[in-house]
Amino acid sequence: MRTPYGVECQYFYGDYRRGRKHEECRLIGSAPKPHHWTPDLCKTCPVPGILLANACPNMELRPQVTRGFLGFMRRVQVSAYCRKVRQDVSEPHIGCGECHTLPEIFIKNSK
Ligand code: SF4
């Protein structure tokens, strides 16, 4: 579903039927304040970009809503974990490299 900022995100859910306006993020869920979800977080959230770049089903995204100076500028920060190799993924856009290794020709040329 598209977020209020027009980006496709599999975790966004909005129900606008019959005058309703219920929106939620099914990744962040119902975290307690001040780490709760509000629609403005979608504007700068890195999750849709990560999902576009890396659709690995073994990668688990772990979001955290953080606050900037004086509590303003809340943002979503994401860490990733690979369930297959059971380790953190340092670059979620790329993945851990276990399932989707680069072809050998690229590895030889980079040395
Ligand atoms: S906060 Fe991020 S993960 Fe959640 S619905 Fe918005 S774009 Fe998707």
Image (tube, helix red, strand yellow):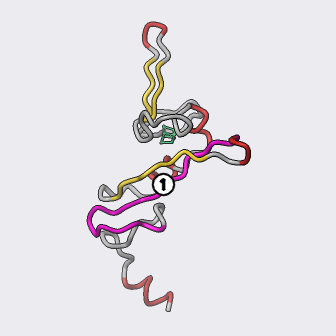
Q: Viewed as shown, does residue 59 lie left or right of 33?
A: left
Outermost bottom residue: 111
Q: Is residue 84 magenta?
A: yes
Q: Position of residue 45 (x, y in %)?
A: 56, 45
Give the SS element for disc 1.
helix
Q: Position of residue 111 (x, y in %)?
A: 49, 92
Q: Is residue 20 magenta?
A: no
Outermost top residue: 18
Crowd tier of the residue under label 1, counting other residues whose Cα lies within 10 Å: few below 14, some 14–19, many 20 or above: some
Q: Position of residue 99 (x, y in %)?
A: 30, 69
- Looking at the picture, does residue 89 appear above or below residue 44? below
Q: Position of residue 30 (x, y in %)?
A: 43, 33
Total marks placed: 1
The residue sitting at 48% across, 35% down in the picture is: 32
Disc 1 target residue? 50
Q: Is 46 or 68 nearer to us in this picture?
A: 68
Q: Is 73 or 96 nearer to us in this picture?
A: 73
The residue sitting at 44% across, 82% down in the picture is: 106
Q: Quadrant of residue 83?
A: bottom left
Q: Is 43 or 38 nearer to us in this picture?
A: 38
The residue sitting at 43% across, 19% down in the picture is: 15
Quadrant of the frame with the N terminus: top left
Please state which amino acid type lies under the numbered disc 1: Ile
> Is the CB of the residue bearing disc 1 within 8 angstroms of ligand 1?
no
Residues in magenta?
Answer: 72-90
